[in-house]
Amino acid sequence: MAPIPTFTFLRALQKVIIVLAAIIVLFSMYYKSFPSPTCHPPPKGLTKHTNTSMSTTTPSNLAATEKTNKPVVLLWFWPDGKKFDFKLCKDLNINSCHLTDDRSLYSKANAVVMFHRDIKDDLSNLPTTPRPKFQRWIWFNMDPPTRTRKIPGIEAFFNVTLNYRRDSDIPARWQLTVKKKIDDEFELPKKELLVCWIVNKTDLHTKTEARYSYYHELAKHVKVNIFDSSSAENSKGENYFITISKCKFFLSFEDSIHADYITETFNGPLSAGTVPIALGPPRANYENFFPSTSFIHINDFPDAFGLAEYLLKLDEDNEAYMKYFQWRRFYNVRRHFTEENQEFAHAVCQACRHIVLTNEYRVILDVYKWYLI
Ligand SMILES: *[C@@H]1O[C@H](CO)[C@@H](O)[C@H](O)[C@H]1NC(C)=O
Ligand SMILES: *[C@@H]1O[C@H](CO)[C@@H](O)[C@H](O)[C@H]1NC(C)=O
Ligand SMILES: *[C@@H]1O[C@H](CO)[C@@H](O)[C@H](O)[C@H]1NC(C)=O
């Protein structure tokens, strides 16, 4: 082993010292450039104490400083009236803004989230005071275009879009994340059933949309176990994932077919260790978000009979079935929130994350022109 030449070593050390000194000088300049408290009085609760027994750096004061420095994101409506705990965002590691529903903070809010469906036709439930210059309005809508009501007069109100679509400013969807290192840990949940679906039983027998007619055709050739979505026993909270994990396949049939409209009905089985059978946009669109080998698409087969045959074949061939889980070595999938009141929580948290990432000035001239085509 050759010793490190002392000369080279000293040269390197010298460089390190110079860089460190530069950082210290820059930092102290930056620090001094902060305005003194005399021209910007600190917020209430942080007023200077002349009393030394109460220093301004106690933990409670630090917390208060942090809170007031974060951008304020005001949720103007509880979407659909569904009130959730903002702490859910912390579960998603999002803590970068001060989320609030307190309308008295309107004039301070850096962003205001407006849930489209809750806006009244006469716009009477929108803010009436002038909008501060720095404030951005977020158009929040999770309904596909065919179910989005065109409210006249709001097309030019917004600066940011929050939606499931890939081309929105804040795409609100549950996404896979890449694992830091390959891991073979996956253990298949115990399977008791072949094909399952959680669906509104009344709708199943009365409605005729694509997904219902496909189900009726499929059920002629393979048993599909139906769990009623109105029963919390099968479909809420932890039970939802338990129900799905017992099945080898799950019908991830979307209620309407639109580009990028791939919802929790797909994320559910994926996160539960079950293979989703997709009915929705074309396969290629699913592959924009999920590995091609993580799911089955109904269009992979000429008809429901072909699909049924394939599922029955996979039931006999464990090796082929297990190939549907190989993507798990590379990606993490997260369970979505399943409580009724949490339906919009994930999207609202994404708005909080986004607002600190970018501060660009932007005007959307016509939100409908972008969305309703
Ligand atoms: C300092 O504050 C403590 C507690 O708030 C109080 O008991 C004490 O009298 C104060 N001392 C002075 C000098 O103001
Ligand atoms: C099921 O569908 C019926 C009819 O469309 C509706 O009245 C009912 O509220 C639905 N149930 C659930 C749990 O969504
Ligand atoms: C947001 O959009 C509104 C309406 O188009 C516009 O008046 C305002 O200047 C925009 N604000 C920002 C910060 O982009």
Image (cartoon, helix red, strand yellow):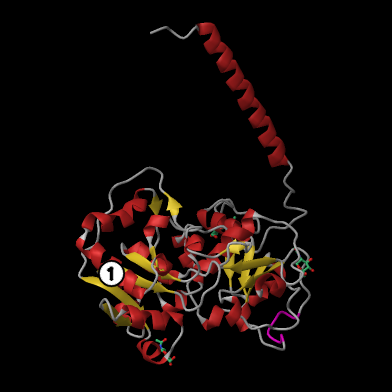
Find the magenta span and give its range: 123-128
Between 94 and 204, the one nearer to me in the picture: 204
Write down the quadrant of residue 115 in the picture: bottom right
On the picture, is 300 further left or further right than 80?
Answer: left
* Residue 64 position in % (x across, y down): 57, 59
- The residue to which callout 1 is attached is 309
Vertical relation: 328 (above or below) 245:
above
Vertical relation: 334 (above or below) 23:
below
On the picture, is 239 further left or further right than 148?
Answer: left
Q: Establish whether ligand 2 lies closer than 8 Å to the Cβ of label 1.
A: no
Tell me if residue 247 is in the magenta stretch.
no
* Residue 152 position in % (x across, y down): 73, 83
Which image quadrant: the N terminus? top left
At x 40% / y 47%, what residue is drawn? 179
* Residue 272 position in % (x across, y down): 32, 64
Vertical relation: 299 (above or below) 208:
above
Q: How many marks?
A: 1
* Residue 18 position in % (x across, y down): 64, 21
Write down the quadrant of residue 189 in the picture: bottom left
Label 1: state its secondary structure: helix
Amino acid bearing label 1: Glu
Q: Residue furthest front?
A: 302
Ligand 2: quadrant of the figure: bottom left
